[in-house]
C-alpha cells in the first residue's frame, strides 16, 4: 500500500509518522514548500531503527512522486487562528482543495481520498466534485475525531480511563455535531444514568468547541495529535480491509432519510472505501438533528459553486 499525505504541516507530518509507525503503508509526504517534506521525511526515516518500523517515507514537492497511491489524505489548507470559525476558511481552502485534488488524481485515479482540511464537510464535497471519483471513494475525517474528544471529556469528567468510554458523534464537524447520549456507555453503564442533563450538554458543547479550545491555547496553529490519530484509524480500516464501522463524513443515499449530501454517519470502511452506512436506532430528536446538520451542509456546499 502507498499513502500520500498532502500537506507537511503539523497534521500532515504527524499523520505520515503514525501511518508508517503502525506499519500500514509506505508514505509519500508532499508540500509546496521547498525541502520541507524532504527534511521531515528524512528525520522520520532516521527514527525507524529505534521505533522499529519498516515502511518507507518519502518527502517531495512533485506530484509525480505520489502516483499510484492507494489512499490520498488531504490536510493542506490554512489553519484556524484564534477567533476564526471553520467556515471562515471556506473560500481560501476551496481554492487549495481544487488544486490539490486535480494534481493527485492524475497519477492516482484509483485512490481513496480522505479529507481533513476545514471546513471539513464542505471540503469533502468539493474533493468529490473535482475528482469525479465514485462517492464511496471520497470521505472526510470528522466523526472519529469528535467521538474521540467526547470520549476523553466524559472520562475526564467521571475520573475513569478513556478506554472505558464508548460514545459517538455524528452530523457536521462543528456546531451541528450530533452526539448520541443514548448510545454512550462508561464501563458498560449508560452515560445518561451517570450524569445529569446539564453535565451532558457541557460535555457536548466542549466537544463541539474542542478544536477552538486548542487553537486558543496554542495561539498559533491548531490541533494535530488527535486529528492525525483519527486519520490513522481510518487508514488502518481501509488498508487492512477490516470492515470497521467508524463515524465519518460520507455520502448518503437515503440513509436516515438523508439523500445526496455528505454528512457524518457510521460507515463501514474497507478496501473499496465506504462499503456501507450503518443505521443506528435514533429517536425523533436525534434524527431531526442529523437531518438538520445535513441540510446545513447542503446549503454551504451550494455556496461553493459561487466561489
Image (spheres, rainbow, N blue to C red):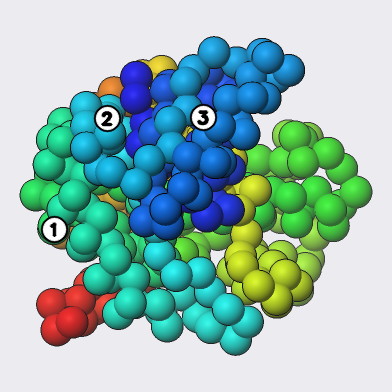
Along the viewing direction, whichever of 138 and 6 lies nearer the viewer: 6
Along the viewing direction, whichever of 97 and 119 lies nearer the viewer: 97
Q: Which residue is mark 1?
A: 129
Along the viewing direction, whichever of 274 and 266 lies nearer the viewer: 274
The structure residue drawn at horizontal position 25% and vertical position 71%, both measured from the top left corner, is 95
The structure residue drawn at horizontal position 56% and vertical position 32%, both measured from the top left corner, is 42
For the image shown, how many numbered marks are present on the structure? Answer: 3
- Closer to the chain start, of discs 3 and 1, is 3
Disc number lying in front (3 or 1): 3
- Closer to the chain start, of discs 2 and 3, is 3
Residue 2's place in the image compared with 205, above or below, is: above
- Are there few (<14), some (14-19), or many (20+) residues within 10 Å of tag 1? some
- Are there few (<14), some (14-19), or many (20+) residues within 10 Å of tag 2? many
Residue 187 seen: yes
Determine contact: label 1, label 2, CB under 8 Å.
no
Q: Is residue 206 left or right of residue 125?
A: right
Name of the residue lying farthest toward the front: 35
Q: Which residue is mark 2?
A: 69
In terms of image quadrants, where is residue 189? Answer: top right
Q: Is residue 207 left or right of residue 258?
A: right
The x and y percentages for residue 195 are 80, 59
Determine contact: label 3, label 1, CB under 8 Å.
no
The structure residue drawn at horizontal position 40% and vertical position 64%, both measured from the top left corner, is 77
Q: Which residue is mark 3?
A: 19
The x and y percentages for residue 22 are 57, 22
The structure residue drawn at horizontal position 47% and vertical position 28%, both measured from the top left corner, is 57
- Are there few (<14), some (14-19), or many (20+) residues within 10 Å of tag 3? many
In terms of image quadrants, where is residue 181? Answer: bottom right
Task: Locate the C terminus and report the quarter of the image it occupies.
Answer: bottom left
Amino acid at each position: 500500500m502507498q499513502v500520500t499525505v498532502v500537506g507537511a504541516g503539523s497534521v500532515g507530518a504527524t499523520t505520515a509518522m503514525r501511518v508508517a509507525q503502525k506499519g500500514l503503508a509506505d508514505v509519500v509526504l508532499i508540500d509546496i514548500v521547498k525541502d520541507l517534506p524532504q527534511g521531515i521525511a528524512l528525520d522520520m526515516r532516521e527514527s525507524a531503527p529505534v521505533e522499529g518500523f519498516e515502511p518507507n517515507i518519502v518527502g517531495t514537492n512533485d506530484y509525480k512522486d505520489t502516483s499510484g497511491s492507494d489512499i490520498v489524505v488531504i490536510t493542506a489548507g490554512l489553519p484556524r487562528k484564534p477567533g476564526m470559525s471553520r467556515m471562515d476558511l471556506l473560500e481560501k481552502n476551496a481554492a487549495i482543495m481544487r488544486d490539490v485534488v486535480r494534481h493527485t488524481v492524475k497519477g492516482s485515479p484509483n485512490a481513496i481520498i480522505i479529507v481533513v482540511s476545514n471546513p471539513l464537510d464542505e471540503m469533502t464535497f468539493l474533493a468529490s466534485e473535482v475528482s469525479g471519483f465514485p462517492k464511496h471513494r471520497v470521505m472526510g475525517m470528522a466523526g472519529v475525531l469528535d467521538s474521540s474528544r467526547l470520549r476523553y471529556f466524559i472520562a475526564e469528567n467521571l475520573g475513569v480511563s478513556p478506554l472505558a468510554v464508548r460514545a459517538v458523534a455524528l452530523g457536521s464537524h462543528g456546531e451541528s455535531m450530533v452526539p448520541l447520549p443514548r448510545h454512550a456507555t462508561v464501563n458498560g453503564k449508560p452515560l445518561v444514568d451517570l450524569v445529569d442533563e446539564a453535565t451532558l450538554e457541557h460535555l457536548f458543547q466542549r466537544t463541539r468547541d474542542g478544536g477552538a479550545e486548542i487553537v486558543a491555547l496554542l495561539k498559533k496553529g491548531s490541533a494535530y495529535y488527535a486529528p492525525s490519530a483519527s486519520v490513522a484509524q481510518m487508514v488502518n480500516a481501509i488498508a487492512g480491509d477490516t470492515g470497521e464501522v467508524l463515524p465519518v463524513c460520507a455520502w448518503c443515499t437515503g440513509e436516515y432519510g438523508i439523500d445526496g449530501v455528505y454528512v457524518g454517519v457510521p460507515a463501514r470502511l474497507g478496501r473499496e472505501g465506504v462499503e456501507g452506512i450503518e443505521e443506528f436506532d435514533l429517536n425523533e430528536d436525534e434524527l431531526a438533528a442529523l437531518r438538520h446538520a445535513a441540510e446545513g451542509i447542503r446549503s454551504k456546499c451550494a455556496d461553493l459553486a459561487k466561489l
